Amino acid sequence: MVPRDDSLQSISIQLDAKNYAYWSYVMKNFLQTMWGIVIGDKKKPTDEKAANYETLLDSWETDNSKIITWINNSVIQSIGTQLAKYDMAKEVWDHLARLYTQSNFAKQYQLEFDIQAIQQNNLSVQEFYAAMSDLWDQLALIEPDVLKAFKPYIDRREEQRLVQFLMALRSDFEGLRGSILHRTPLPTVDSVVHELIDEETRIKSHADKAPKTFTPAVFFVSQRPQSSNQNRPRVAFDECAFYKKKNH
C-alpha cells in the first residue's frame, strides 16, 4: 500500500493501547515505501558537501513529517500527546513499541479473555460482529505461520468462532441460535451474521407493529367511617305484618 499524498488522511484504525499488534500491522503496510525511515535504515542526510544534499534533506524531512502526522492521526488523543516530544519518526515508532509490545502468550491471554467476556447487550448484530471480528483478527496475527497454512486448524478455528459468537448473542435470537447449532455441516460465521441481521429486522418490524397496550387507571373510593353519635334519631319503620310490632 503506497502512502497517500494527503498527510491529513487518517488511517482506518486507531491505536488504543489494546490493539497494538493489529495497528502496527496496518501501519507497516501503509508506510511500506517509507519503512526505512521508520526503522532507522534510511537516516537523515548529514553530508553537507554532497551535490544533492539539499534535495535529499528536504525529501527526508518531508517524509519524516508525513510519517509522524500519519501516526498521530492513527492513535487516540491520550497516546498522541505523549509523542509531541519526538522529532523523528523512528523515535515515535520505538516509543510505541516499548509501551505496547507484549509477548505473544500475554497478548493471546488478553485477547482470549476479551473474547470470552464480550456480550452483544444493546449492540446491533452488525456492530457486535465488527467488535468480535476485531478481536479475532488481532488473535490471528499472532498465530504461527505453520498453523495458518493448516486447513484442519483453520476449519476448527472457524467452528470456535461460531460458538463464541452464538454464545454472546442476546436471548432474542434463542430460536435461531438453537437451529444453527443443529445444522450439519455448520455454517460459516459470515452466513450466520446474514441470517441474524434478517432475524433482527423481523423482530424489530414485529415490535413496531404490535398494538400498544394501556393500563387503565384504577380509582379507589374510601368508605366513610360510621358516626359514633348515639343521639342520632332513628328512622321509624312500618308495623311488621306478622308480629304486629314496629321497628321489626
Image: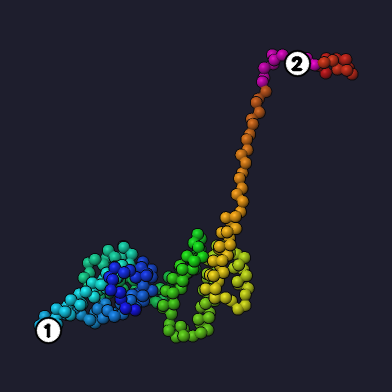
* Residue placed under numbered mark 2 in the picture: 235
From what the image shows, is residue 59 above or below residue 240? below
Most frequent secondary structure within the magenta stretch: loop
- Farthest residue toward the right? 242
Q: Position of residue 1 (x, y in %)?
A: 34, 79
Nearer the observer, 10 or 68: 10
Q: Position of residue 193 (x, y in %)?
A: 53, 70
* Residue placed under numbered mark 1 in the picture: 51
For image coordinates 36% across by 75% down, the residue present is: 26
Q: Which residues are magenta?
A: 227-237
Determine the secondary structure under disc 2: loop
Q: Are marks 2 and 1 in contact (CB under 8 Å)?
A: no
Q: Tell me, what colour scheme is on the image?
A: rainbow
Q: Residues within 10 Å of mark 1 (few under 14, many from 20)?
A: few
User: Whole-Å distance between the Cαs marked 2 and 1?
Assistant: 130 Å
Q: Residue 228 appears in which quarter of the rendering?
A: top right
Would residue 172 appear left or right of 6 to someone viewing this image?
right
* Magenta-colored stretch includes residue 234: yes
From what the image shows, is residue 218 above or below residue 105? above
Determine the secondary structure under disc 1: loop
Would residue 41 appear left or right of 16 to someone viewing this image?
left
Residue type beneath disc 2: Val
Q: Residue 135 appears in which quarter of the rendering?
A: bottom left
